[in-house]
Structure formats: structure tokens, C-alpha cells
Image (cartoon, grey):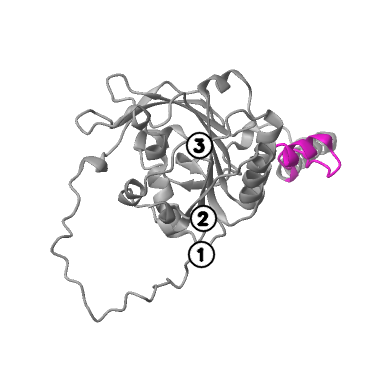
Amino acid sequence: MGEAPPNALDKLSLDKIALNKIALNKTALNKKPITRPALASDDPLNGLLEKTGLWRASSINADYKQHCSTGFTRLDQELPGTGWPADGVTEFLHDRAGIGELRLLAPALARMTHEQNRWVLFVSPPYIPYPPALAQAGIDLARVIVSQPKAPKDYLWVLEKALASQSCSAVIAWPGRIHEKQIRRLQLASKDGYSWGILFRPEESSKNASPAELRLRLRPVPGNSPGYSQGYSPGKDNSAIAVKILKRRGRWESEEFTIAFDDQLLRPMPDFSEMVVDQNISTTQEKQPFDSPPKPAIQTLREYQ
């Protein structure tokens, strides 16, 4: 015997249940994902994010601008964005000049001087950079200038103005003692000028906090020659440097690792003794490339040769 047909009350209950299911499904379809509310323009946190260089952990690489590869695979792997930053301040902490710190920068500087119509500025280096070595590394000396400010106040003024000018792809300096507030000013100036600020400082500076976005400690590799400051000997191994990243965006400090250089200084120089000189070419006319930068008011590195 079959089941009895449902009465009108049962039909009404079933219809009500069906309507409730439809309403629930419609609500689920219309439900929007939860999003973080935008910060108001007058929100104190928004002001901090814009003016102090703070960043959200949820967007570590959102505003990280890669300048170019370092030229060293291991170092690229350890850096945010897999390369040197395009702007901001980077600190290199070491206690002895001439251990390979400039050679660590050479691949990036070479690329900058050839791809950008901007200057690479050295501010008061402890030694005048050796032009033949820089040229051998591929750096265009016509894009390199050296400034030697006399007074400390002029030193910081030159750094800040150069970083904010948009005319320098990199500003390299040896400031010695410098305060946190001064580094913060340089950090903001480098962001405004889309310029990479590079500060070489004593290793003891690692004990103090710094607004710099990136900090690296450099040490000579045991068994290597101490570098140019103690005399360079081609018979010794000067082809490596120990690096430890003390501060980087989104990650803890790294272990110390070794960067090996392709030591081009030990390669034989080309033989120019059999060069043929065309006597019809005038030596009084100076060739100027079309996109060459304007002649600076301070000395270019070529003038030191």
C-alpha cells in the first residue's frame, strides 16, 4: 500500500524549507570577502608608513625596487628582490679599507654607468679609486665623479643634495660618525631622487640601530691578503670576501658566507705596442657621445689619472 499524499500543511512546511534554502544560498553568493579597511589620510599609522620608511610584513616586496643583480649568485639569493635596491640607504660595515668592498659593487656600478645617463658619485673616499682597475671592471669613468667636501656640515649637505637630485644613480660615501637622524634624512632623500645611497661605516656601528634598509658586514677571508691598505701582492690570494647580512627586509640576518671574485687584476693586459695610428685623424677634436652627461663642476675620476 502506497504512502498517503501530504496534506496542505505538510506542503506549506516543505515550501517554507525550500525558500529558506534558496535564501541561504543567495546570501552566500552575495557575501563579499573580508578586506582590510583603507587607512584614512589623517590616520597616524598612514603618516608613519609614508614618512618614516616603515613597511608592512604582509607586503614585504610590494615597494621594493630592484636596481640590478649584484653579479654574485649567492648574494642575489640572500637579498630581497634578488639584487641591490634601486634606492634607499645600504650600509657596509667593515674595519679595514681595501678588503674588496668596491669589487663587491663593481658589477652593479658597471651596469649603472652604461645603462643610465646619471652619475656615480664618490664622496671623500679614503683612497682615490684606481681608474685602471675600475675600467677593467667595466665601469665607464666618464660617469664617475669624486667630491671632497672640507667641512663636516658640507659633507652631509653634499650627500643629501646628490641623493635627492635625481642625477645620481649611486652615491658612495665614507661618513665615519653619523647620527641616526642624519641617516634617516639620507634615506628619505634617496627615495625622492630614486638614487642608491651606499655608506661604508666602521663595524662597531652594528651595535646601534639604523634606519638603513639593508646592512651588510664585510670581513677579509682568513688566508687572503688584507688588501690594498696593507699592500697588494699579486702572488697572494685576494679573490674573496666574507659577507653577513645583518638587516634585510622580511628575513632574519644571514649566516656568514664567502663571495669569490673573478680576479681580473691578475689577468694579462692587452698588448697595445702594435696599434696602428691613423695619422689623418685629428687629435685636437674631442669626441662627445650624444647622450654623455654634462661636464661636472667637480673632478671626474679621469682627471686623477
Please tell me whether mark 1 sits on a helix, a strand or a loop: loop
Q: Residue at x 68, y 31 (%)?
A: 3
3 or 1: mark nearer the eye = 1
> How many residues crowd around disc 1 within 10 Å: few (fewer than 14), some, or many (20 or more)?
some
Q: Residue at x 33, y 48 (%)?
A: 137
Please tell me whether mark 2 sits on a helix, a strand or a loop: strand
Q: CA distance from mark 1 to mark 2?
A: 8 Å
Whether residue 35 is visible, yes or no, is: no
Q: Nearer the viewer, residue 81 or 1?
A: 81
Q: Please give the residue where the numbered disc 3 appears in the rendered image.
A: 80
Does residue 147 belong to the magenta stretch? Answer: no
Indicate which disc residue 119 carries. 2
3 or 2: mark nearer the eye = 2
Chief secondary structure of the magenta portion: loop
Badge 1 vs badge 2, beta-carbon distance below 8 Å: yes
Read off the magenta span. 30-52
